[in-house]
Amino acid sequence: MPKKKLDPLPSAAFQILLALAGEDLHGYAIMRQVQDQTGGRVRLGPGTLYSSIQTLLEQKLIDEVFGEDDAAGGERRRFYRMTTAGRKVACSEAERMAGLLRVARARRLFRGEHV
Amino acid sequence: MSETFYALLLRLYPARFRKEYGEEAMRVFRERLRDERGPMARFRLWFDLVGDAGLSLPREYRRVAPALAAVPASAQSGIPLFETLETELPRPGSFFFGTLMAFAAVAGLVFLLNHAGTVRQYGVRFGRYASSPYRGAIAPQGGGAGMAGNGVSAMTPGQPIVWQPPPQPGAQPLYSLDDAERRRILAAVAATLRQSYRDAEAAQRIASALARNEDDGFYDVVTDGGLFGAYVSRQMQAVSGDRGLALIYMEMPMSSAPTVGPDHWINEHFLLRVPVARAAPASPPGV
């Protein structure tokens, strides 16, 4: 299977890594987590979600584990777990974004106190 | 209804994606359907799904294309590599169209075979009146007694068969029958039958019938060797009831060829096939 490069990291892939930073999640939980962490602005559809998951798996940034979904009555399903490499990539991306944010602040791009 | 529609939407994705994530995607859809109720939520759900398909479909197909191109590259050090591009069974529609294509191909082949007419290539002619598959295409091998006498050229046993080059387009025919040549051939056929055919009475009847036809001018307009061979073959078979009898014409002259088994050379263009008598079945021991 061909490797899809993740440099720069696509927004959907970064959101998924962020969602998995706290715990292992299955597909629907990742979707919900992404929706929560973006205030409802990003809603990943199943196509984008699993396409991104496939790419992250190929790049070994996440792992697939099987577990039971307590919310669905112990139903067995696929969960995804961020790997060390995935954490490193997510950190790097977050730092890159933080750097951009610093530049934006220095240029006084933001007005108000929310930044 | 919603699930059916989404299942149809999922079928647009490449087979590999459907196999790997189709079930999961369906489950996510069901969970969203369960959680997002109300007209506005449903509208937004479908809006998301259709938009998502529009964005992710091209990406998935782009992902498939390099996979197909990469297959030959993985063959190493000349070792043959066999890989299947898809692991799932073809869809029923594929079987249907495959069957349709196969029928069309066979029908086309049958049509071409029936309407091929006469084709000349390498001195071999296949026509409607071709009297035998031997005709010009296959030369008998091995040794045997040559046909001699009756004023026709005899073949020397054991010598190799020599083919002459095919005629150039527009050139005169290699062989054209005239009255004298027809008579010589018919005389040689009659003599060979009397000598070699298992049923002497039938051989005589055939010889008489051929001579009568010749006298009646039945063959007068026949100058083509193939047609002449076909006529004579049909006549011999009609008189004797033996479908094995045949006068086979070869457009390319055989400068030297042996007589093999049932085949007797009449001249360098004609071969008379006289079926040999079947050996009587061996009696079981003690009978």
Image (spheres, rainbow, N blue to C red):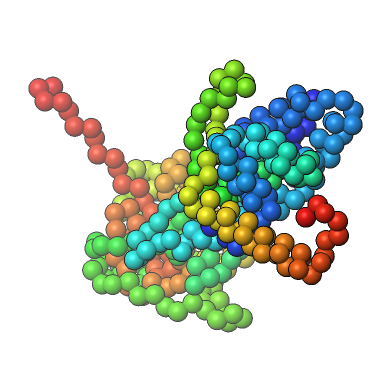
Q: How many marks?
A: 0
Q: Nearer the viewer, residue B97 or B117?
A: B97
In the image, farthest residue toward the right:
B39
State which quadrant residue B258 falls in. bottom left
- What residue sits 59% from the left and 80% below the top? B169
* Quarter of the figure with residue A31: top right
Question: Residue B144 location, x and y as percent?
Answer: 24, 61
Instruction: Answer yes or no: is residue A56 visible.
Output: yes
- State the residue in front, B231 or B40: B40
Give above or below for B167 relative to B279.
Answer: below
Location of residue A112 (image quadrant): bottom right
Q: As rendered, which of A36 and A57 lies closer to the eye?
A: A36
Q: Work out whether A79 lies above or below A113.
A: above
Q: Position of residue B119 (x, y in %)?
A: 58, 66
Question: Which residue is located at x 53 percent, y 70 percent?
Answer: B121
B78 sits to left or right of A82: left
Image location (x, y in percent) of residue B210: 49, 54
Going 70% across and 35% down the picture, which residue do you hit? Answer: A32
